[in-house]
Amino acid sequence: MKSVVLAADLGGTNLRIAAVDSDGTILHLTKRPVPKGVSPDQLTDLIREMGAECSGVVSETGRLSGVAFTAPAPVARDFDGLLTKLPNLPSLVGFNLKTALTDLFHLPVTIENDATAAGIGEHWIGATRGVENSICVTLGTGIGGGIIINNEPLRGKDGTGGEIGHICVEPDGRPCGCGSHGCVEQYASATAIERMAVESGMNTASAAQVYEAWTAGDKHAKAVFNTMGRYLGIMLAGLSNALNPETIVICGGVTAGWDAFAGRVESEIATRAYPVVAARAKLVRGALGDNAGILGAARSAFLVAQ
Ligand SMILES: [Zn+2]
C-alpha cells in the first residue's frame, strides 16, 4: 500500500485539501470557501468534513501517514502551531492549528508557510527539480517567497525566511501593511497592478484585465507592467547577488501576464546584479500552478512521516 498524506492550503478566501501520494500525485482534491470571520471551531469542522472526503478515497489505495498544512503566516522550524500573525484571517489569531489537527487526525502534523511550501513543491517535482539554489516568488494579492539553499528551504529562526515581499525598493514609497514604506509588494503584486492601473486612469477591476489591455497595446497598461517589472527586477537583482540562485521561479496568478513583465525583470537583473550572478540566474514560470503550495506541504509531511 502506498503512503499518502492529507495536504491543506489555507488562503484568505478558500481552503483546499488534497490527498497526495509519495510521488506527488494528487489522488483527490476538494475546495471550499472560507466563511468571512471564520472561527477556529468552524475551520476545524470544515477540515474534518473535507479531510473525511479525502481519506475516503485514500482508504481504497493507500495508508494515511501524515497531515500537512500551509498557512499565510511565518512558520519556524520549531513552530508550536499557535497562529499569531494572519493579516487576511484575523479571526484565527490565537488558534493552535497544530493541536487541533493532531486531535482530529491522530497523525504527525506539519505546518509550512504558504510561499515556502510553494518553493518546496516546485523543488520537489516542478520547475526547480534538481536545482540546488532557487528563489520561488509567489505573486498574488501579496508577494511571498520560498528560498531553497543547498536543497534546503530557508525558514530563519522565527519563520520569516523568504519574506521577500517586504524588501524595500523605494525608501520614501507607499506605506505598507507591514509598517515599512516602499516594499516591493506595493509595486509588483496583483493588488499593486490593479491600484497602479486605476491611478493611471484605467477603468479596470483586476490584474487580468490590465494584462488584457496590455495585449491590446494600451499605453497605460504598458506603463503599469513596466513599473511592476522594474521594481520586481530591482528586488531580485539584489536578492540574486546575496543568494546566487541558479533559478528564479515565478508562481501565482500574476504569471498569466508573464509576457508583459518578464523581459523587464530580466533586464533589471542583467543591469544591476553582478554579471556572473545575472548570467547564472534563469527566470522561469512555475510548473505546478495553484498546486505548488499543497504539493510542497505534502513533501514536508512525507519527510516527517518517514
Ligand atoms: Zn511591507
Image (cartoon, rainbow, N blue to C red):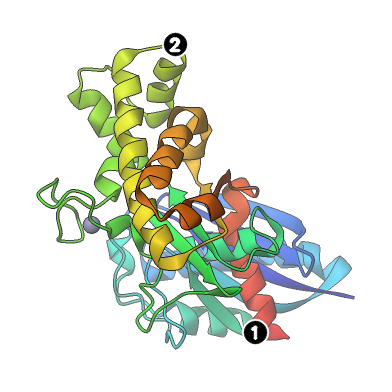
**Which residue occupies 55% across, 84% down?**
102
Q: Which residue is mark 1?
A: 304
Instruction: List x then y, in percent, for residue 175.
Output: 13, 50
Helix, strand or loop status at disc 1: helix
Crowdedness near tag 1: few (<14), some (14–19) or many (≥20) residues, C-alpha within 10 Å: some
Queried on whether the Cβ of the residue with tag 2 lies below 8 angstroms from ligand 1, the answer reads no
- Nearer the camera: disc 2 or disc 1: 2
Image mark for residue 216: 2
Q: Could you say which is closer to the camera, residue 200 or residue 31? A: 200
Q: Could you say which is closer to the camera, residue 235 or residue 145? A: 235
Instruction: List x then y, in percent, for residue 29.
Output: 67, 54
Q: CA distance from mark 2 to mark 1?
A: 49 Å
Q: Residue 295: in sight, yes or no?
A: no
**Which residue occupies 27% across, 25% down?**
197
Residue 65 located left or right of residue 51: right
Q: Is residue 108 above or below residue 134?
A: below
For the view shown, which residue lies furthest in the front direction?
A: 275
Kindly indicate the quadrant of the structure image that contains residue 201: top left
Instruction: List x then y, in percent, for residue 216.
Output: 44, 11
Residue 119 located left or right of residue 54: left
Q: Dividing the image into 4 quarters, which one contains the C terminus?
A: bottom right
Q: Dividing the image into 4 quarters, which one contains the N terminus?
A: bottom right
Helix, strand or loop status at disc 2: loop
Q: Is residue 164 above or below residue 185?
A: below
Which amino acid, by three-letter code, is at mark 2? Ala
Instruction: List x then y, in percent, for residue 51.
Output: 64, 66
**Which residue occupies 69% across, 84% down?**
305
Which amino acid, by three-letter code, is at mark 1? Val
Q: Could you say which is closer to the camera, residue 4 or residue 194? A: 194
